[in-house]
Amino acid sequence: MIKTLYTAANAPEAHLIKGLLEQSGIEVSLSGESLTIGIGGLPIDAAQVEVRVNENQFEEAVKIIKEYEDKMLGDDEENAQWECKNCSKMNPASFGICWNCQNEK
Ligand SMILES: [Zn+2]
């Protein structure tokens, strides 16, 4: 049984999360993947992409996603994150360019 774990805002984010999960041995499928066939395998940037995992790995995957989100949002003590003017994603203070679109701080 496949469950939807996370809805990424765009294909690059979905691929980033897929990579994180696969590092932990979790099998991942992306809902938008079939759309990329025929255009050289380039991710489609416009649509939201669902990150899906097997039910038996779902809980483990949720933990990894939580760690990912915590890292992206930072914790209260280091509340110096900045918002990208280009794509509105939050970046940790230590990032000089946006993790999502490489726009400068
Ligand atoms: Zn950005």
Image: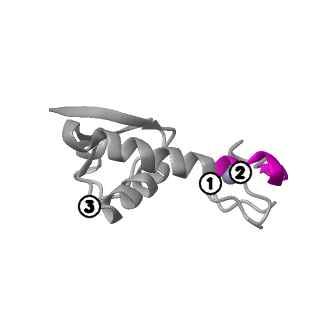
Q: What stretch of residues is rendered in magenta?
A: 71-83
* Circle number at residue 25: 3
Say if the magenta span includes residue 76: yes
- SS at circle 1: helix
* Circle number at residue 74: 2
Name the residue: 69% across, 58% down: 98
Count residues near mark 3 (Cα–Cα under 10 Å), then give few for <14, some for 14-19, many for 20+: few
> Is the CB of the residue bearing disc 3 within 8 angstroms of ligand 1?
no
Name the residue: 26% across, 61% down: 25
Q: Quadrant of the C terminus?
A: bottom right
Whole-number angstrom distance, CA of label 2 to CA of label 3: 25 Å
The amino acid pointed to by label 2 is: Gly
CB under 8 Å between discs 2 and 3? no
Taking 49 as reference, is 92 left or right?
right
Whole-number angstrom distance, CA of label 1 to CA of label 2: 5 Å
Taking 21 as reference, is 102 left or right?
right
Taking 84 as reference, is 50 left or right?
left
Between residue 15 and residue 23, name the one nearer to us.
23
Query: Does residue 27 appear in the picture of this structure?
Result: yes
Dot 3 or dot 1: first in sequence order is: 3
Between residue 18 and residue 66, name the one nearer to us.
66
CB under 8 Å between discs 1 and 2? yes
Count residues near mark 2 (Cα–Cα under 10 Å), then give few for <14, some for 14-19, many for 20+: some
Residue 24 in percent (x, y) is at: 33, 61
The residue furthest right is 80
